[in-house]
Image (spheres, rainbow, N blue to C red):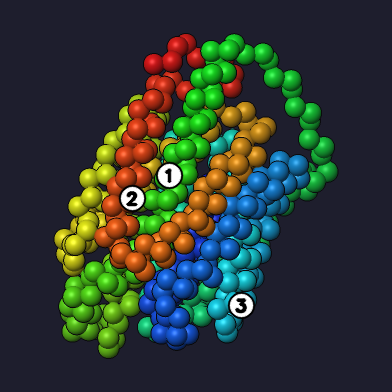
């Protein structure tokens, strides 16, 4: 493996770790903390909310620092900092301490998306496939959080679900620093060149750019509701809806000497991992389609998929619920690279990290606000109502994307005409 391949691999591992750290608590709260600490699942979500606010709020200064100082330097801060924060969180004793630990994890996790994605979209061509591959690694982090945490709950305790990945992240941080040290030093010594003055644009082009930007940020917000609701709540949904299937699989696995006695948490985590991992494949398909067909048709198709499967989910249990959950996760994961793709095609490279920062402020602020939504809906009506709300969110996305132009406005040249 050459240095370029190693660079991309480490960036992808960073995306995996970023999503893994932010979702460890989701499985811990769903499967064990509500018993150990005597606090209901809905109340536990309150302590995760500030961390997701930090995940969004600190994206903008992270992107600004990366542009002003060093993108690779900020990635080193991410790997080592979030690893230390996760280890500390593993030693918390109270819900308040947990909330503070999750806040620091969110603050450091905010670095990855505006910085790592800016590196990926600026350094390599075939942007759609690169973003899709990077997105698959992020989704494996989502899946790994459920799998690793479920296994740790059964075999080592929930604290190790924070501590072991934290140690691994620090190790990766030093490997990244060794690989990129000369570039970090060069970034530190060199003053950034002044930005060139923007050429005047026509009113029609400016109008098109505003229209596309509005659609990007609207769909970013609504997609974030879907992403957070599905990834954060899925372990709890499976804990409620797949208990019969999980008990049967646990007994089968025990007979086959795969698991130990009553490893139901491991089975539920494994089922969530399988759904997340298979759904990740959708990003590779979407990435190739974006480069060939553009974002509008692809985005509309994914919105329709989500609308159908969310509407079908209420009342389902066990095997059929598992199949339908896989259907709506294919849509939820498949949409992830589309807005990043559109930003990469419309934003100037020099400002791209900052624009990604704004995009993720919107995204992760909505992620944080979604946790109280899940809490209120779950406490009063259960998950069936949440599925109907998400089906409505998919309809909003479909409506917005329908007015997206076929040809995106380019920062280098004005497009022909809006479709």
Vertical relation: 225 (above or below) 342: below
Residue at numbered disc 2: 390
Please tell me how crowded label 3 is: few (under 14), some (14-19), or many (20+) other residues with Cα within 10 Å: some
**Nearest the camera: 92 or 396?**
396
**Of 45 and 283, the residue lying toward us:** 45
Q: Locate residue 84 relative to residue 376 in the image: left or right.
A: right
- Mark 1 vs mark 2: which is more N-terminal? 1
Mark 3 / mark 2, whichever is N-terminal: 3
N-terminal-most mark, 1 or 3:
3
Q: Which residue corresponds to the image point at 37% horizontal and 38% vertical from the top-left?
A: 397
Is the residue under label 3 in contact with that under label 1 (CB below 8 Å)? no
Q: Position of residue 174 (x, y in %)?
A: 66, 62
Q: Residue at x 45, y 12 (%)?
A: 417
In front of the other: 382 or 380: 380
What residue is shown with label 3? 97
Q: Residue at x 42, y 45 (%)?
A: 223
In this rendering, position of residue 377 left or right of residue 59:
left
Instruction: Kindly indicate whether the residue at mark 2 contacts the one at mark 1 (C-beta within 8 angstroms).
Output: no
Q: Is residue 226 visible?
A: yes
Measured in 3D between alpha carbons, the distance from the residue under mark 1 to the one under mark 2, in whole angstroms, is 9 Å
Q: What element does badge 2 sit on?
A: helix
Q: Does the image show residue 115?
A: no
Q: What residue is shown with label 1?
A: 222
């Amino acid at each position: 493996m050459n240095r370029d391949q190693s660079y991309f691999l480490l960036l992808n591992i960073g995306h995996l770790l970023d999503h893994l750290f932010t979702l460890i608590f989701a499985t811990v709260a769903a499967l064990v903390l509500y018993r150990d600490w005597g606090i209901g699942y809905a109340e536990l979500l309150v302590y995760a909310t500030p961390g997701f606010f930090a995940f969004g709020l600190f994206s903008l200064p992270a992107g600004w620092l990366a542009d002003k100082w060093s993108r690779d330097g900020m990635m080193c801060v991410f790997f080592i900092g979030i690893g230390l924060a996760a280890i500390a969180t593993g030693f918390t004793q109270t819900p308040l301490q947990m909330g503070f630990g999750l806040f620091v994890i969110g603050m450091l996790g905010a670095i990855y998306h505006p910085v790592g994605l800016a590196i990926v979209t600026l350094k390599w061509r075939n942007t759609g496939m690169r973003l899709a591959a990077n997105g698959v690694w992020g989704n494996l982090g989502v899946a790994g959080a459920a799998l690793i945490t479920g296994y740790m709950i059964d075999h080592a305790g929930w604290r190790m679900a924070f501590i072991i990945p934290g140690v691994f992240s620090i190790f990766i941080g030093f490997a990244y620093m060794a690989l990129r040290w000369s570039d970090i030093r060069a970034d530190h010594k060199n003053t950034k060149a002044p930005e060139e003055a923007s050429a005047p644009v026509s009113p029609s082009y400016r109008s098109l750019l505003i229209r596309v930007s509005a659609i990007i940020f609207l769909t970013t917000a609504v997609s974030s509701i879907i992403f957070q609701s599905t990834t954060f709540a899925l372990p709890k949904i499976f804990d409620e809806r797949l208990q019969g299937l999980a008990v049967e699989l646990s007994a089968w696995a025990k007979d086959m000497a795969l698991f130990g006695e009553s490893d139901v948490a491991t089975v539920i985590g494994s089922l969530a991992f399988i759904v997340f991992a298979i759904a990740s494949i959708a990003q590779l398909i979407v990435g190739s389609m974006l480069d060939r067909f553009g974002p509008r048709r692809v985005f509309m198709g994914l919105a329709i998929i989500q609308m159908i499967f969310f509407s079908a989910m209420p009342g389902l249990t066990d095997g059929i619920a598992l199949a339908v959950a896989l259907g709506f996760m294919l849509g939820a994961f498949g949409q992830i690279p589309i807005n990043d793709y559109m930003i990469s095609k419309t934003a100037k490279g020099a400002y791209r990290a900052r624009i990604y920062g704004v995009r993720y402020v919107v995204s992760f602020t909505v992620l944080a606000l979604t946790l109280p939504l899940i809490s209120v809906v779950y406490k009063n009506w259960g998950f069936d109502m949440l599925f109907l709300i998400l089906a409505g969110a998919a309809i909003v996305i479909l409506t917005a994307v329908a007015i997206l132009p076929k040809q995106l406005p380019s920062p280098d040249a004005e497009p022909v005409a809006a479709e």
